[in-house]
Image (tube, helix red, strand yellow):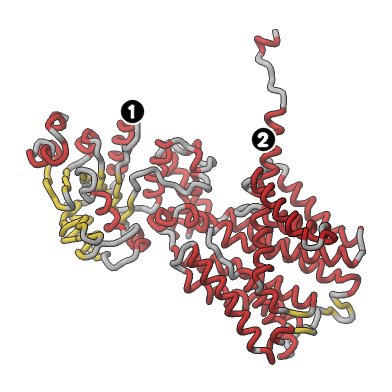
C-alpha cells in the first residue's frame, strides 16, 4: 500500500468500526463483530512471536485461555472487582508466557512446537482436574460482567464490550506498529532472518526471545479477560486444537509478519464462517479450498493483495511518450 | 606494539577429524594479520571458535586486550571487541540497510537517543558508500554492497579486532581493489584486523604479517613476501607461480 494511502485506510477502518453499532443494532451482527475484533487482537499479537519472531509458539491461544480462567476464578470465586479482570488476565498471561518461554529459549523448529503445544495440553489437564476451582469439563460459568453504576456492559446488545474490545484492538495495532518500527522489533526480525549472524552482532538471543513472548502475551491476556466477562464463562475448549488451528488459519490467510494481514485474516475468516454456516460441515471444505487458492496466488496472504493490485495499476498506466516520438 | 588478541593452544575436533590442532598466535594492536591456506585447513573454523559463532574451542585460551574470554558466550565476546564477518555475504534480509546497521549497534549507542544512534549508523553507511541505499531492503542490493554492509554492521559493534573471512570472494578485480582500500581505511581508524583470503595479492597488500595454515596447524608465519616464497607454502598451497605476486 502507498505510504500516504495507509493512514487514510487505517482511519477508515476504525471509523467504520466506530459507527457500526450506530448503523446496525442487531444483536447477532454485534456478537459476530465482537468475536471478529477479539480474534483480530489474538491473531495480531500471535503474529509478534510467529510472524515477526519466526518462533513456532503454539501456546498463544493457551495464554488467552489462562487470562480468561484467571479472571473468572479471581472475580467469581475470590470476589475481586470485575474491573480487576483485565489486569489479572494480563498478569496471568504474561506469567504463563515466561513459564513456557524458559524451556524454549534455545530450542528451534519442531521442538518449540512440541513444548509450546504441550504447555496448552498441560493447562487443559490442570483445568479438567481442578474442577472445584475451574468447573472441570463444564467450564467456569457465571463470571461477573463489567458494570459502571447501573450501566452493564451487556446493555444495548453488549455495546460496552464492543467498544472495549475495539479499544484493545486499537492499542494492539498501535503496539504492533510501534514494535515493527522499533529497535526491539528489528532485533526480533534479525533473529528470525539469520540467528547466528544476529548473535555475531551482539543481539542477546535469550533476552530478546523472552521479551518477545512477554510482549505478545499482554494482548491475549487482556482480551481473554474481556471475553470471559462478555460470554460470562471460560471453557476447556479454549485450550483445544480446533481453536488453535482456526486462529492459525486466520494468521496464515492474512499474512504473517505484517501489521494488517492478521487483522484482515481474522475479519474475513469470521465473517466467511458465518456466511457459510448454512453449508454445515461443508463450509470447512470451502474454507480449506479458499485458503489454498489465496495462498497459491498471493503467497503473502491477504496482506499481499494491495501490493499486487498496486503493481497491476502501475503496469496498466500508459507510459509517457518520449518527446521525439510525439513530434 | 602490545597484543590486542592472544590465542594459546586452541584445538577443535569433529569426531575423529582434528580441524584445529593446538594453534597459538597473537595479534598486535593496529596490526593486520593475513591468514591463508588450502581449503579445509581450518581457517574459517578458527574464526568460528574464536567468536563461538556457532561453536567454541575444545581447549585452549583466548584473551582480548589481556582479558580471558574463553568462557564467555558469543554475545559477550562481541562486547569485548572481537567481531567477525562471514565467507558468503550475510544480512538481515527483510529489514532495510539502515536497520541492519542499527540492529548491530551496542546498547550504549542508544543511551543518548535514537536520533544520535541513527546519525552514527548513517555515518557508517556513508563511509561504505551505502548511504543512498539506506532505505532499501538488504536482500535487494548488489552482492558487493551486501559484502560491504556485512562489514559495516561489524564496525557498528565497535570492534577492537575485526575478523574478515574471505572479504574479496566473488568480487571483480576493481571491487577487490576497492576492498583493499576499505581494509586499509578500517585499520587506519584503529581497528586490528585478521583477514582470511585466497587472493594472495590482497593479503600481500594489506597484511603486516602472514600466517599459513595446513591441516589445522601453523605451516609458516612471517612477512608476507617471505611467506609466499617459503618452499613449504608453495608445495602445500600456492604452487610455483604465486611466489612472483
Query: In the rendered structure, the residue with mark 1 lies on which chain?
Result: B
Residue A326: image x %, image y %? 70, 11
Residue at 13% x, 37% y is B228
Residue B17 placement: quadrant: bottom left
Q: Is residue B34 visible?
A: no
Residue B78 placement: quadrant: bottom left
Residue at 37% x, 45% y is B151
Compared with B165, B180 (above or below) is: above
Compared with A70, A315 (above or below) is: above
Using residue A54 as the reference point, say whether residue B83 is left or right of it: left
**Camera-side residue of A64 and A153:** A64
Label at residue B195: none
Give the residue number, with chain letter if any, for mark 2. A311
Label at residue B174: 1
Residue at 19% x, 51% y is B28
**Camera-side residue of B96 and B9:** B9
Residue found at the far left of this picture:
B231
Front disc: 2 or 1: 2
Compared with B51, A296 (above or below) is: above
Label 2 to label 1, Cα distance in Å?
36 Å
- Label 1: few (<14), some (14–19) or many (≥20) C-alpha neighbours in 10 Å: few
Residue A66: image x %, image y %? 65, 77
Q: Are marks 2 and 1 on the same chain?
A: no
**Camera-side residue of A29 and A278:** A278
Residue found at the far top of this picture:
A327
Q: Is residue A104 visible?
A: yes
**CB contact under 8 Å: marks 2 and 1:** no
- Label 2: few (<14), some (14–19) or many (≥20) C-alpha neighbours in 10 Å: few
Query: In the rendered structure, the residue with mark 2 lies on which chain?
Result: A
Give the SS element for disc 1. helix
Amino acid at each position: 500500500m502507498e505510504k500516504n494511502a495507509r493512514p487514510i485506510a487505517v482511519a477508515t477502518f476504525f471509523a467504520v468500526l466506530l459507527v457500526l453499532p450506530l448503523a446496525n443494532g442487531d444483536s447477532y451482527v454485534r456478537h459476530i463483530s465482537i468475536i471478529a475484533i477479539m480474534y483480530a487482537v489474538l491473531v495480531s499479537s500471535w503474529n509478534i512471536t510467529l510472524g515477526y519472531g519466526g518462533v513456532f509458539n503454539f501456546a498463544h491461544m493457551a495464554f488467552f485461555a489462562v487470562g480468561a480462567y484467571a479472571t473468572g476464578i479471581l472475580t467469581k470465586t475470590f470476589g475481586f472487582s470485575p474491573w480487576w479482570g483485565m489486569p489479572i488476565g494480563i498478569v496471568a498471561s504474561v506469567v504463563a508466557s515466561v513459564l513456557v518461554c524458559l524451556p524454549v529459549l534455545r530450542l528451534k523448529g519442531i521442538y518449540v512446537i512440541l513444548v509450546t503445544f504441550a504447555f496448552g495440553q498441560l493447562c487443559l489437564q490442570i483445568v479438567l482436574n481442578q474442577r472445584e476451582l475451574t468447573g472441570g469439563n463444564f467450564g467456569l460459568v457465571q463470571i461477573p460482567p463489567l458494570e459502571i453504576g447501573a450501566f452493564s456492559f451487556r446493555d444495548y446488545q453488549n455495546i460496552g464490550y464492543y467498544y472495549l474490545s475495539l479499544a484493545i484492538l486499537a492499542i494492539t495495532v498501535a503496539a504492533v506498529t510501534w514494535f515493527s518500527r522499533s529497535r526491539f522489533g528489528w532485533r526480533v526480525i534479525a533473529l528470525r532472518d539469520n540467528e547466528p549472524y544476529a548473535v555475531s552482532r551482539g543481539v542477546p538471543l535469550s533476552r530478546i526471545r523472552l521479551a518477545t513472548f512477554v510482549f505478545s502475551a499482554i494482548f491475549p491476556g487482556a482480551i481473554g479477560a474481556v471475553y470471559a466477562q462478555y460470554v460470562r464463562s471460560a471453557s476447556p475448549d479454549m485450550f483445544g486444537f480446533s481453536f488453535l488451528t482456526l486462529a492459525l488459519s486466520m494468521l496464515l490467510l492474512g499474512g504473517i509478519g505484517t501489521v494488517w494481514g492478521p487483522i484482515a485474516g481474522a475479519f474475513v475468516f469470521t465473517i466467511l464462517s458465518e456466511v457459510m454456516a448454512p453449508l454445515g460441515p461443508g463450509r470447512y471444505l470451502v474454507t480449506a479450498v479458499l485458503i489454498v487458492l489465496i495462498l497459491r496466488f498471493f503467497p503473502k496472504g491477504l496482506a499481499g493483495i494491495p501490493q499486487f493490485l498496486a503493481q497491476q495499476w502501475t503496469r496498466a498506466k500508459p507510459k509517457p511518450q518520449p518527446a521525439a516520438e510525439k513530434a | 606494539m602490545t597484543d590486542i588478541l592472544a590465542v594459546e593452544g586452541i584445538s577443535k575436533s569433529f569426531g575423529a577429524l582434528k580441524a584445529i590442532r593446538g594453534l597459538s598466535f597473537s595479534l598486535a594492536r593496529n596490526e593486520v594479520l593475513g591468514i591463508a591456506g588450502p581449503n579445509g585447513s581450518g581457517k574459517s573454523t578458527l574464526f568460528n571458535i574464536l567468536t563461538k559463532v556457532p561453536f567454541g574451542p575444545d581447549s585452549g585460551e583466548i584473551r582480548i586486550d589481556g582479558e580471558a574470554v574463553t568462557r564467555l558466550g558469543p554475545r559477550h565476546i562481541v562486547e569485548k571487541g572481537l567481531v567477525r564477518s562471514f565467507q558468503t555475504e550475510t544480512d538481515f534480509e527483510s529489514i532495510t540497510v539502515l536497520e541492519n546497521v542499527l540492529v548491530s549497534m551496542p546498547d550504549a549507542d542508544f543511551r543518548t537517543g535514537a536520533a544520535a544512534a541513527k546519525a552514527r549508523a548513517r555515518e557508517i553507511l556513508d563511509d561504505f558508500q551505502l548511504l543512498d541505499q539506506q532505505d532499501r531492503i538488504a536482500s535487494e542490493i548488489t552482492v558487493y554492497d551486501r559484502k560491504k554492509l556485512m562489514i559495516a554492521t561489524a564496525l557498528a559493534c565497535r570492534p577492537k579486532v575485526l575478523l574478515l573471512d574471505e572479504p574479496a570472494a566473488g568480487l571483480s578485480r576493481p571491487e577487490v581493489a576497492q576492498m583493499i582500500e576499505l581494509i586499509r581505511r578500517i585499520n587506519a581508524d584503529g581497528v586490528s584486523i585478521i583477514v582470511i583470503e585466497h587472493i594472495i595479492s590482497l593479503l600481500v597488500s594489506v597484511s603486516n604479517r602472514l600466517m599459513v595454515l595446513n591441516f589445522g596447524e601453523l605451516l609458516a608465519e612471517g612477512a608476507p613476501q617471505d611467506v609466499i616464497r617459503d618452499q613449504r607454502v608453495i608445495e602445500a598451497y600456492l604452487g610455483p607461480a604465486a611466489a612472483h605476486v
